[in-house]
Structure formats: C-alpha cells, structure tokens
Amino acid sequence: MIEASMLNGLRSLLALLACALLFASATHAQAPRENSIRAELFADGPAVAGEEWTLALHFTPVAEEWHGYWRNPGDAGYGMELDWQLPEGWEAGEPLYPVPERLVISGLMNHIYEGPYTVLVPVRVPAGARTGDLPAIAVEADYLACTDIICVPQQARLTLDPSNIARDPRFDRWRAAIAPLLDTEGRFAIWNELLRVAIPVPAALDLRAPHVFIGEPDLVDYTARQAFFRDGDRLIAEIPLDRGQVPDSLSGILSFGSGEGVRFTARPGGVPPAGTPLAQPADALPSVWLALLGALLGGLLLNIMPCVFPILSLKALSLAKAGGDKKAARRDAVFYTLGVVLACLALGAVLLALRAAGEQIGWAFQLQEPAVVVALLVLAAAITANFAGAFELPGLVMRGGKGGSSSFATGLLAAFVATPCTGPFMAAAMGAALLLPVAQALALFAALGVGLALPFLLLGFVPALRRALPRPGPWMVTFRCWMALPMALTALALVWLLWRMAGTGFALMALGLAAGTVLLLAVLFARRAGRFRVAGVLVALATIAGFAASLPGQQASPVQASDSIHAPRTFSEAALAEARASGQPVFVWFTADWCVTCKVNERAAIERDSVRAAFEDAGVITLVGDWTRRDEEIAGFLTDQGAAGVPLYLWYPPQGEAQALPQVLTPDLLAELARQAR
C-alpha cells in the first residue's frame, strides 16, 4: 500500500509540475490570458458589527469542458488558496463548499465541480467595528481549472466596495447548495487498513448511492470501493487507507448521490461493528435476477464435482432400486432439497454475520481453518469406506435409508462437501451476495442450494427421468464400489491440503484420525464382528484419541507455495501498484489449494509452456495471491473486485484498467492477451 501511495503521490506531483510549467509560460506571456474559470466576489448584504458576514466566490467556466476542484482535490490537482485583505480584527473562516462530484481519469480520482459553482466564506466582524467607512475588501485567489486533457492554474484578484453593497438575489440559492453541517459529531477508528467512520444520520434517510469525501488529503485511497452499513441512526463507512497520517480529527462531506449531502466532523472513538450492509447503487451491482440465475446455474454445475457426483449418483440409483413408488420419490426429492438449501443458507448466514462483525472472509471461508478440513477428511474417508462396502451406515445414501431423514441428511452432506468449489456463474452471484441487503443475499444462497439439488428434484418429480435410469441389478454393487474412487481421491486431496496448510506432521496425524474413525465404524456396523467387536472398538477409540491428542501439538507451518513456471511475485496491493507503474502488462491470479477450479485452470491453462513464452515475449509481470489460509488483504481486495471467493483472474494492459477474465481459462486466451499487449 505504501508503494501504491507513493505512485499516486508521484502522479499528483507530475500533474502539479505540468500545471506549474503552464503557469510559468502564462506569466511570461506579453498579454494576460483570460481565466478559463472566471471568479467573482459578492457579499450577503452590508457587514454588521459583532455578526458573521458571508462572502461568496462565484466561479463560472468559460466552456463546458472546464471544471474546478473541492478543497481536497483527490489524486491530482490542488485546492483553492485565498489571501484576504480585511480590516484589522476581521477574520475569514474556512470556505464552505457544495457537494463535489467524482471524476476518474487514467485511474486517478478527482473531486470536482462541473458548471458554475459557488464557495461561501464566513467573515467574523468584531463587535464595535466601524462598518460605514471601510477600505475595499480584497482577496487573491489561486485555484486550478482543468479539462480531461489539460490543467491551467488560475489567479484572480477580486475586490468589493463595502460602501456600495447590495445583496445579490442569488445568495439564497448559493447558500442552499452548501452541504449543511451535522450538529452531532461522528466517531472514527482505524482497523485492518480501513478508515471506519460512524456518521450520525437518521435511519429513515434514503441513501441510494452514498460516497464519503474525506477532507484530509492522502488519508484514504480515493479510487477504492467504499462499503456502507446501517447501525440504527448511524451510517458506518469503511474506506481503505492510503499513505496519509491519521489526524486528530476528521471532516468531510457525505454525498447522498444526487448532488445533495451533509458535512460532518468526527473524533477518534469507538465505531460499532458493521451492521446491515447498505444496498449499493443499481449500476454498481448486477441485476438481482441475473445474480439469482447465476447462483442457480453455479449450484447446478457443482453436481459434476468429484466430491458431489458420487453422492448424487448413488442417491439417484436408490430411486431406481426403490421401484415406481411415485410418492416416496417425491418425498425423497423434497427432503434432499430441504437439506441442501438449509445447509447453503446456514453457511451464507454465518458468512454474512462474520463479515458484519468485521471479518474479511469469503465463500468457502471454513476451508481456511485446518480443523474444518480435518472434519471433512474424516467424513470423506468414512464415505469412501462405506461406498467400498466396509460397513453400512443406517439412514444415509448408501443402501436402505428409509424415510425423509435419509434424504435430508444426504442433502446436508452434499452441500457441505461442495463448498470448496466456485465455478462459472457462481462467483459474480456470491460476490453480489456480500453487497446486497441480508434478505436478498440469503435468497442468493438459497438459489445456490436449489441449483445443487435440482437434478435430484427433477428425478423425484419427473417420472420420465426416473424411467430413463438403469434397471436395478447386480451391476449396482459394482457401480457403488467404483464411486468409492472419486471419494477416495477427494480424501487424498484433503490430506494434501492439510499438508499444504499445516505441514507433514499435522497431515499424518489427521490421516491417522480418519483411519481410526473408519475402523470404529467398520467394527460397529460390520455385519460380522463376533467376539472381536469389543476389542475392535477399544482399539479404534484408542487410535482416535491418540491421533486427536497429537493434532494440537503439531507445528502448523504452511508449506511454501508450489513452483510456477512464471516465477510470479507474491500478491500485495503494493506489489500490484509497483507492477502497474512499470508500464508492462500484468496478470494476477488468486487461488487456493482447496479450490478445484483453481487447480484445473492452473494445470490446463496457466502453467503451460506456450503461455510462458507469450508472457515472456510481451514482458508480462505475474502475481499470485494464495488464499489457502486466511489473508485479510486478499479478502479485502476480492471484495473490492466484487468477488466472494476464488478463482479470480485479472489482466492489466499497459496503462489500462483491470479486465476480469472468465473463471474457465484457456491457454489461447492468455496467449492472445499477451500478443495484444505486445
């Protein structure tokens, strides 16, 4: 972040140097040049001793393309400077500005005014001052006028004759345009590289597209996405920090998004945890209906994942084995769907609650905790042994579970083991879920569950699909054993993930714990155990206890990231800013060892010699963000990009903005991007 801030500062300095050169050339010109934004000075009637007198600086661009700046201009430009010539004892206060607008040019955010605008300046007139015979009031104003291409410093010397002042009728309109000051101070705090500000505004206030303009320069990242939350009559804004020093007090303008807003001041203090997320403007989010469709399709595609497909297949075959009982088929389909949807809603609710409490997490967040992965490993090992015929758990998918409870449990199981995956259509939907109000966000998680349950739901309610299933027979036993293979591969993948997350010792202890659990289940539910059942149970329990006790003592040290043929740099926002400043194309990919789609893309598209050659020819800089373990900087960046999880692939052309690439990559796509950049 420091390097990114230095880059922004360098850009601002270059812009100021360019303006200074233009100003110098204008100064040495033989004829004075007319200002591109004309300035005029007005007063709100005659001055009265002992009262506040308001002066107005009215600015009018000579053409539509010129714009002026707020007191904090943003990433480039500079604010207005005023040098007043007032009678002795008179004092000019801080200028009061209307609500500014945002203008982004080449990745730099500017706080501007387009068209005519007016700045009011309060002047304190001392008691007993002689106001009838005063010298002219004068001010020298230095300000900046810019188009999208060029900036020209402006100078104006404005005078006002106090003996001949008539109130300008436009003063009421000018005063109404100034953002009013809230009469209650807010509070601000720094947390996890975020400026968190609690602004006291009524809960009934309709905020469609809020934005906070911070008055203190360089404190925040102006281009970063601002997150807003409601906590009763307080609006909580979270804004990524930049390089500026944290002040003793804060001031700014909260824009309502329609040219209206309020000024606020804030002191350091306690800021409550983020409450209800505020709905983002319509143009900042995909359509809710499109997001629901994406969640539905994403859930549907999860059925082909190796950890879900065996469960779905055997559950489908259980319908065929049950015969033509239409009522039982529909009951099983409904209960399976309820289990899947409930699991997805529960995971979504926990995710939203943790984010509201300030945690930077995303979809599949539970897989960043080794203890959860150990539980999944034990579960996958038990399912593998069950499919292989080592034992028979009553009431589950495999053979003979009667009633809705079996299907409900299977639905819970299918949803839980599917969480490591984020596939096509799903990422945008889950990203939107983190920004939408709670009710709409939960609807997206429910749609994900419906998509995951849809194949079995159709089998239950469409007789033609059930009739298309193979007839029951001895082949089903063989098929069930074959389905143990993908589940065994899933268990091995979880062992590998634990090795990557916490080291060899931890992975071996977890594997021993899974083996002890399988042994215990085999002894308890085997058809023939005889007199050895008690001894087997004792051995299994001792094995489980021994390995479980050894797990906490293992050194949880993650293994170094896998080698890549691209030799990528480790992602950080500072590294990304440095790479973009080089003027070379940049490719960033975010991955995790528990993400199946990520690993497929890396093997099939990224880690290819043809892609490496194309990247080398074009001078592409590569960065990788590994989200296997929790990383709040990566989580925050993913949120800023509207992504709930990984994979995420970003391409930055030279001097261009980020392009989000599809979640299913091909070598030809990456090579073509490199050729275009070259």
Image (cartoon, rainbow, N blue to C red):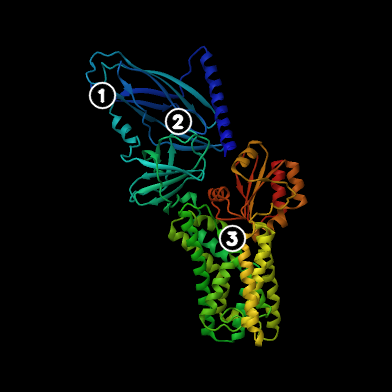
Answer left or right for 76 relative to 44. right
Q: Can you give x and y, in whole percent of width and height, for residue 138 in the image?
A: 35, 17
Tell me how far mark 3 sits from mark 2, CA to CA: 47 Å
**Mark number for residue 69?**
2
Question: Where is residue 533 shown, x and y percent of the image?
Answer: 64, 83
Dot 2 and dot 1 residues touching (CB under 8 Å)? no
Question: To which residue does mark 3 refer?
Answer: 367
Give the distance between the C-alpha atoms of the residues marked 2 and 1, in whole angstroms: 27 Å
Q: Quadrant of the C terminus?
A: top right
- According to the picture, the residue beneath numbered tag 1 turns out to be 45
| Nearest to N terminus: mark 2 or mark 1 | 1
Determine if residue 411 is in view: yes
As shown in the figure, which amino acid type bears the numbered disc 1? Gly
Q: Amino acid at mark 2?
A: Tyr
Question: How would you rate the neighbour count of disc 2 (Cα within 10 Å): few for under 14, some for 14-19, many for 20 or more?
Answer: many
Vertical arrangement, residue 94 with respect to residue 4, above or below: above
Residue at 43% over, 52% down: 279
478 lies left or right of 632: right
Q: Quadrant of residue 416?
A: bottom right
- Judged left or right of residue 171, residue 219 is right
In the image, residue 430 lies at what x, y percent?
A: 53, 58
> In this rendering, would 146 be left or right of 130?
right
- Give the SS element for disc 2: strand
Could you tell me which secondary element the residue under label 1 belongs to?
A: loop
